[in-house]
């Protein structure tokens, strides 16, 4: 199978890319034509290594009414993602090898993007007993997390870190001090107070990040911190990294682009955990992206049904359907604004997540894996959730306009998404 | 105006118009003249998801004195317990063509959601920690009757601001009518984000009460002791309760208000309870008249 992408921009140069058997055969003047060659006209488009989202919720098994692996993968490739790592808070919780294999089988059937299962740290995400981590790894799990809930018991977290380190496994921790966060539904502060909603303090996230840094440092075990949203959290991580602590972290497009002003009018689409914070936090998150404190941008894609989100600010579940807006939000807020370069965005959205998960990612070089996203950075578009491939239409980005549109997504050289086929 | 969901966003003229109409009803009601058939053939539903005696009874009496039909729904007696969603309940009730739905709910924002689903006027009868607009209106009505003009007057709200929809509504009502608003309470009971509201947070009872014309105490829920928000009723009374001595800090002729029900000897000591400066019972009559005025003006499109 041969694919040729002609006249496309790669790091500012107009080139042709030839892909054969899932790898890049050449980048330069050479191209291919003829029978059996898929030719893509790349005029006006930029080629990027395919995005990897190391934090999504595909909801299958158990919550197929919110999303299933097929719709989630369709959403992923529509957002330019060539690989996603899916969190284990399914029903049942992904804590057994057969469930990991089930997810991989369903992903193969969907045949869109690569899917890397994340398995639970503790059985049932209950925080009481470790899951069979090595067996899960051997079945295909790439990392471990109790995402959705933290491993609250510090001794359990310590043991999880040490056990995982025995086999070189990656742990991802959701940082939330439950006793501080209890009862809160949005960020604590002016906007919560105006609406009379119980708030979640930055302290709930910062305190747990601090604990996790201490454990990682004292036991010299690597740890990845999920969806960091606070200025205090980023500062703790910055200082830890400077001391050589083996922590890495991620943040999300909504913490980069939005604040808790979005909750006005009791907008449940803006209810997410950690909550949307203040402008000070948003700017601190961007500063952390700029100076390298933040390693990755993930969507924390959390699709929900309309009925789920209709439940009011207290009962509505947390989460944003984020796969299909991530690139445009990040490109507009970070690259177009001149805050970071396009190459730095590739580190955040491709290279670093791949390195943390220990998986191969697309590389725009001879011999590189042909997981490629073609974007039109000049195209402006307005977010319309009804057009999402995801079942989850829940997004606070609805109606907002961004620059940067995904035009093609290729996984292993195969076109898995082409916007022109949608029109 | 279709709905009354909160005080924030109203203008002083609207508030004064309701208070003026309430004055008229006050004269009539206290003279023993009722009912008035201004809302004959109209219907009011009270939909209460939280227990309430005074507010529900006040709305019911107000509607009945004006000749309206009233249907009371409380959670225990409705299909809410069968798991019917708020939206389904709203659409069902609205299909019966009520003129007004008065709603109380433990969740902030519930009346906003209701208002988006129904044709009927929605009056917020208290939602979570957010707002209790008719309480603020009756407080302003009572204060105005005692002080005359409110512009330039000083008010202090003392106690559990964090959990108080009464405080959140009164801060705006007082401020809209030109009063200076001060708050005082233990820091555990002051919410974050008060800077965005038109009020000043004080660091002592002296600072809060000095020269005040109105001092409002808020009901404290004694079970909050268990969560570490304050240590005991006795300590609360001593440092955050109102009594004759601390009222000497206030302006001469200052009055005490309380949304009720009072924990006697906690928020208010016995030497001020049941005295002329404590207006808690007059507030109840004011509440009736303000709600009559509001129902009348909403339904007859005068707001």
Image (cartoon, helix red, strand yellow):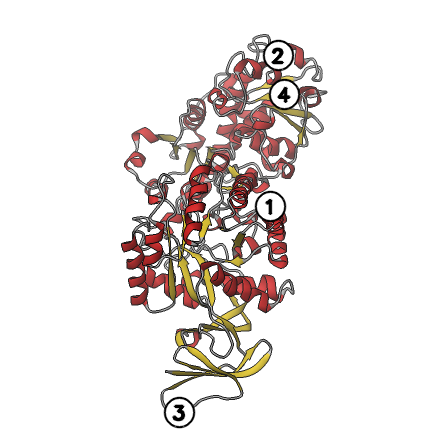
What secondary structure is found at the residue carrying circle 2? Answer: loop
Is the residue marked by circle 1 packed among few (<14), some (14-19), or many (20+) residues within 10 Å? some
Q: Do labels 1 and 2 share a chain?
A: no
**Image spot of residue A297 (x, y percent):** 52, 58
Indicate which disc, 2 or 4, sits on the residue closer to the N terminus. Answer: 4
Q: Nearer the viewer, mark 1 or mark 3?
A: 1
Task: Please give the residue where the numbered disc 4 appears in the rendered image.
Answer: B215
Q: Mark 2 lies on which chain?
A: B
Residue marked by disc 2: B243
Have a look at marks 4 and 3 and say if they share a chain: no
Q: Mark 1 points at which residue?
A: A236
Depth check: give the residue in front, A133 or B263: A133
For label 3, the residue is A34
Residue nearest the observer in this picture, A277 or B97: A277
Q: Residues within 10 Å of mark 4 (few under 14, many from 20)?
A: many
- Vertical arrangement, residue B23 with respect to residue B279, above or below: below
Numbered disc 1: secondary structure: helix
Q: Is mark 4 on a helix, strand or loop?
A: strand
């Amino acid at each position: 199978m041969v694919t040729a992408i002609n006249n496309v921009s790669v790091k500012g140069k107009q080139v042709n890319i030839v892909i054969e058997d899932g790898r890049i055969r050449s980048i330069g003047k050479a191209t291919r034509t003829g029978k059996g060659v898929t030719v893509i006209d790349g005029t006006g488009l930029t080629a990027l290594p395919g995005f990897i989202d190391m934090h999504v919720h595909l909801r299958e098994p158990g919550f197929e009414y919110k999303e299933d692996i097929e719709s989630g993968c369709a959403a992923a490739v529509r957002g330019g993602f060539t690989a996603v790592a899916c969190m284990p808070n399914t029903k049942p919780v992904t804590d057994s090898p057969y469930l990991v294999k089930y997810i991989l089988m369903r992903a193969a059937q969907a045949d869109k993007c690569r899917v890397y299962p994340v398995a639970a740290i503790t059985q049932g995400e209950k925080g009481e007993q470790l899951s069979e981590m090595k067996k899960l790894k051997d079945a295909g799990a790439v990392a471990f997390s109790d995402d959705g809930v933290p491993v609250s018991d510090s001794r359990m977290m310590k043991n999880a870190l040490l056990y995982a380190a025995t086999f070189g496994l990656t742990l991802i921790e959701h940082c939330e001090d439950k006793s501080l966060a209890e009862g809160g539904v949005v960020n604590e502060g002016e906007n919560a107070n105006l609406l009379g909603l119980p708030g979640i303090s930055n302290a709930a996230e910062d305190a747990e990040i601090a604990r996790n840094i201490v454990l990682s440092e004292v036991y010299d075990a690597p740890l990845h911190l999920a969806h960091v949203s606070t200025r205090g959290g980023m500062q703790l991580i910055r200082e830890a990294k400077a001391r050589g602590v083996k922590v890495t972290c991620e943040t999300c497009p909504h913490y980069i682009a939005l604040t808790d002003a979005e909750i006005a009018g009791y907008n449940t689409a803006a209810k997410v955990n950690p909550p949307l914070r203040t402008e000070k936090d948003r700017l601190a998150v961007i500063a952390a992206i700029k100076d390298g404190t933040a390693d990755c941008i993930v969507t924390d894609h959390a699709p929900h049904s309309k009925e789920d989100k209709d439940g009011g600010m207290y009962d509505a579940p947390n989460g944003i359907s984020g796969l299909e807006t991530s690139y445009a939000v990040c490109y507009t807020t970070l690259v177009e604004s001149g805050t970071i370069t396009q190459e730095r965005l590739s580190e955040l959205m491709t290279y670093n997540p791949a390195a943390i998960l220990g998986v191969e990612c697309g590389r725009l070089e001879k011999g590189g894996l042909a997981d490629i996203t073609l974007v039109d950075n000049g195209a402006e578009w307005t977010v319309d959730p009804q057009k999402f491939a995801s079942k989850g239409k829940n997004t606070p980005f609805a109606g907002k306009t961004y620059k940067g549109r995904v035009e093609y997504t290729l996984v292993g050289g195969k076109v898995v998404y082409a916007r022109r086929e949608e029109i | 105006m279709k709905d009354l969901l909160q005080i924030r966003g109203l203008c002083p003229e609207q508030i004064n118009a309701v208070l003026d109409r309430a004055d008229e009803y006050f004269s009539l009601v206290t003279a023993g003249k009722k009912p008035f058939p201004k809302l004959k053939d109209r219907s009011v539903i009270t939909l209460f998801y939280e227990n309430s005696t005074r507010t529900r009874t006040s709305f019911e009496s107000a509607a009945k004195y004006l000749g309206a039909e009233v249907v009371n729904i409380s959670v225990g007696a409705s299909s809410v317990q069968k798991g019917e969603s708020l939206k389904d309940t709203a659409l069902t009730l609205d299909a019966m063509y009520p003129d007004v739905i008065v709603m109380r709910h433990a969740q902030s924002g519930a009346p906003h959601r209701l208002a988006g689903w129904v044709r009927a006027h929605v009056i917020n009868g208290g939602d979570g920690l957010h707002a209790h607009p008719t309480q603020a209106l009756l407080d302003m009505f009572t204060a105005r009757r005692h002080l005359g003009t409110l512009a330039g007057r000083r008010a202090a709200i003392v106690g559990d601001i964090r959990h108080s929809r009464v405080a959140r509504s009164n801060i705006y009502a007082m401020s809209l009518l030109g009063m200076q608003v001060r708050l005082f309470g233990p820091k555990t009971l002051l919410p974050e984000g008060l800077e965005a509201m038109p009020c000043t947070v004080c660091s002592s009872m002296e600072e809060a009460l000095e020269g005040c014309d109105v001092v409002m105490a808020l009901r404290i829920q004694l079970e909050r002791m268990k969560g570490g928000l304050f240590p005991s009723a006795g300590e609360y009374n001593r440092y955050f309760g109102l009594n004759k001595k601390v009222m000497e800090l206030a302006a001469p002729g200052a009055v005490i208000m309380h949304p009720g029900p009072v924990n006697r000897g906690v928020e208010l000591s016995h030497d001020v309870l049941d005295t002329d400066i404590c207006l808690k019972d007059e507030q109840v009559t004011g509440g009736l008249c303000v709600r009559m005025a509001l129902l009348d003006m909403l339904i007859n499109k005068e707001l």
